[in-house]
Image: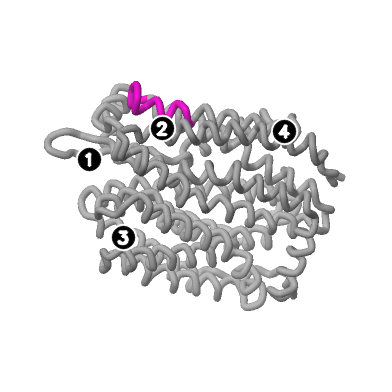
Amino acid sequence: MSNRTPFPKVFWVANLVEVLERFAYYGIYFSFGIYLTKLGYSKDQLGFVQTLFLLLSYCIPVVSGTFADRYGFKRVLIVSYLAYLPSISLLILTKSFSGIALTMLTIGLAAGIFKPLVSGTVRAVTDKTNTSLGFGIFYAMVNIGGSFGPIVMGKLRAIDWNYAFYAAAAAIVVMLIITLLFYEEPPRKPEGESLGKKLAEIGTVLKDAKFTIFLALLGAFFWVPFWAFFNLCALYVDSNLDTAALYGSIRSVFGTGVANFFSEETDGVRRVLGETISHTGWIIMLLQIPVSYVFERFRPMPSFLFGLAVCSAGFVVIGMAKADSAWLVFPGIALFAIGEMISSPRIQEYITWLAPKEKAGLYMGTNFLAVAVGAFSGVLYTSLYGSFGKGGHPEHVWYVLAGHMALAIVVFTVFRKVAGDFRTHEE
């Protein structure tokens, strides 16, 4: 587009901060299950912390967005760093369950404060000529940080867990310096709405019983198994698969240098580090554009249901990696990632279609309730994984998750037939 508005400096500053924050957040989050397990805590305790962590991460943004509008993005960004930094540092000092749980909840709080601010900056400094490209760059930054965080943190924790925590804390310090020196408050028209008013508006939307039931189903049948993947995959790979065989698989395809990058040497044997491969960011970076291109020609709900089927297949293949061959975890993760790329954007697009244009943001704001329901994946599936592990079959949790996703297809199909489809506002 020849007349595309150039991005201002604050756009690039905000995206750099986003990379660093996702580096620290996902570096800690993907390693956390491995860390708590190595300290000897139970899967029930792990699931409890995971649930509260995700609840804070995805519920706080509705509050922090309002405060950012009132007091400025830069000030609230700094508040998030001041919550992040001591909580990450405390991971170095405390090994008690209560101490670690409180620390992780504070990290979740910090992440929730931060979450809407960079996307809000991108929205504020883009216009109709460059908004698609701007958000495309933003999502690329999310995936770059989310991919390299677990890899780097995994390599560091193989030396000493404290090194991983030092790296995360250092990333937050760099974010603080960048924000203080280079972040300029983006020009925008303040919404001027109080938190009370926003909550009242969300309450008005939720008076639509059909839409509220839809959100509850979305949380229970999409977000719960979705978050189970991220809660469990790194721990499952690290604890239950033949990671020496995984190293051999990577080396045979990509060479020794790449295989060493994802592994550590223990007692003379190189083994893949679970968190270095158990995420979807690298697949999304490679395939999101072609997947979006293919599925944009189909309606959102059928695409969403097809994405659920692909996720379900991915779960089955991940489970087979324990029962058959460890290398199957790679196509299993890839299938889940493709299902995520198909289903997640399309269901969010579908929700925007349900709202009049002037209320699209409000309807999307209610989507956090569905995500919050998904946070209970920790107390459900992490505990179930622990139970299956005690019985000698940890892979069975993936087959249950596959059934959960398959059931979701049936549930949403029946819901649409019984309740009728929503009237959309496409024009």
* Element carrying mark 2: helix
Amino acid under label 1?
Answer: Glu
Rendered-image quadrant of the C terminus: top right
Residue 92 % position (x, y): 27, 65
Q: In front of the other: label 2 or label 1? A: 2
Q: Mark 4 points at which residue?
A: 413
User: Any mark on residue 165, and which?
Assistant: 3
Q: Is residue 244 above or below residue 53?
A: above
CB under 8 Å between discs 2 and 1:
no
Q: In front of the other: label 1 or label 4? A: 4
User: Any mark on residue 396, and which?
Assistant: 2
Badge 2 or badge 4: first in the primary sequence: 2
Where does the magenta region start and end? 315-327
Residue 89 visible somewhere in the drawing = no
Label 4: how many Cα within 10 Å (few below 14, some 14–19, many 20+): some
Q: In this view, does 376 lie above or below 194?
A: above
